[in-house]
Image: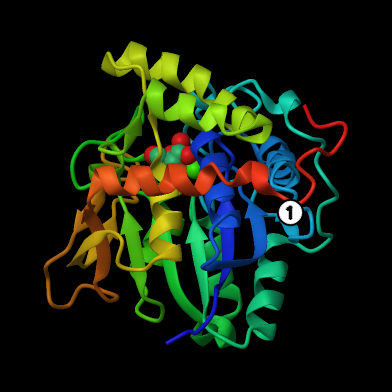
Amino acid sequence: MTSGPIPMIIDTDPGVDDAFALVLALRSPECDVRAVTATFGNVGREQTFPNLRRILALADRADVPAAAGAVRPLVHPQAETAPDWHGVDGLGLRADAFPAPGPGDARSAVELMADVLTSAEAPVTIVCLGPMTDAALLLGSHPALIPRIGRIVAMGGSLGSGNTRGAGEFNIYADPEAAHRVLTQADVPVTLVPLDLTMRCAVEGTWLDELTAAGPRCATLAGTAALYRSTFLGRYGRDALVLHDTLAVLEAAVPGTLRTTAFRLGVACTMGPERGLMVPDRRPEAPGAPVEVALDADVDAVLTEILRRLTTLDRVAHAAQPGHR
Ligand code: BDR
Ligand code: CA
């Protein structure tokens, strides 16, 4: 058992819900965020990396090392990005409302992750909020450090329907080979938070208004949701923001928050319409170990707890810092 805050690395593709998730981690006392890394995903890494540092600046946590990760999937080009949801800037066309990004770390994402693991005195949780490319590269390139990873918690996949132009869920569809690598290895326990649960965790105007009212930093964060809400309204007929990535962070911070079921999983890496589909594999000879798939939670309690934690954002040390809009 780890006593004290959990050492954590967060790999992310900000991304509107990624921004909420990262702030959630930075405002959760259980999380000792030792590094954050930016992968391609919702938009290109040329956007996600400065966005990552904008979010750190918003939370007054520019002290957290931030490194640049993968610019593309392991094998095939990325099939789609998500500017309709996250804006071409990745922050709902509100990137300019954030404080300016601080400097990035000179190390690559994998180098930074390896350094954090090497110096960690307790097992490190790696949280994946985008395509799993950086995690797959880490596992493949630093096998000696794998025992230092306590757990991987990833948002991705679906046992039901997907949310891409293909059949799969976005993070897995963006790099199926990387997801297959991470989800079929037996060395590190994985908890996967799929669409089946996250789509039940949509918040509407009242929740976002409460966040907005908590202060100017909270209002900046909540403001990123406007474009997503209108796109969601067009597709699903409901004015809401789905908090996909925050669920993975809350589970990483407070293990057991989400109720899981164990499945051996594979990922369809073929090039047909099934590419990126997550495939439960019940064969005894299936590779890897069962993945804990989070399929249920007390949704109302989870959304209330996320809001409670996010609304502490304006209690950061320099809340009145000049220059922050
Ligand atoms: C996932 O895809 C991204 O658009 C979101 O940030 C989330 O990580 C949901 O499918
Ligand atoms: Ca994401």
Q: Nearer the viewer, residue 203 or 43?
A: 203
Residue at 67%, 75% in the rendered image = 116
Q: Position of residue 31 (x, y in %)?
A: 55, 66
Q: Nearer the viewer, residue 69 or 201?
A: 201
Q: Quadrant of residue 265?
A: bottom left
Q: Position of residue 28 (x, y in %)?
A: 53, 59
Q: Quadrant of residue 287?
A: bottom left
**Residue 239: in sight, yes or no?**
yes
Residue at 47%, 22% in the rendered image = 228
Q: Quadrant of residue 257?
A: bottom left
What's the amino acid at mark 1?
Answer: Arg
User: Taking 143 as reference, is 40 above or below it?
Assistant: above
- Give the residue at mark 1: 61
Q: Position of residue 120 (x, y in %)?
A: 64, 83
Q: How many marks?
A: 1
Q: Residues within 10 Å of mark 1 (few under 14, many from 20)?
A: some
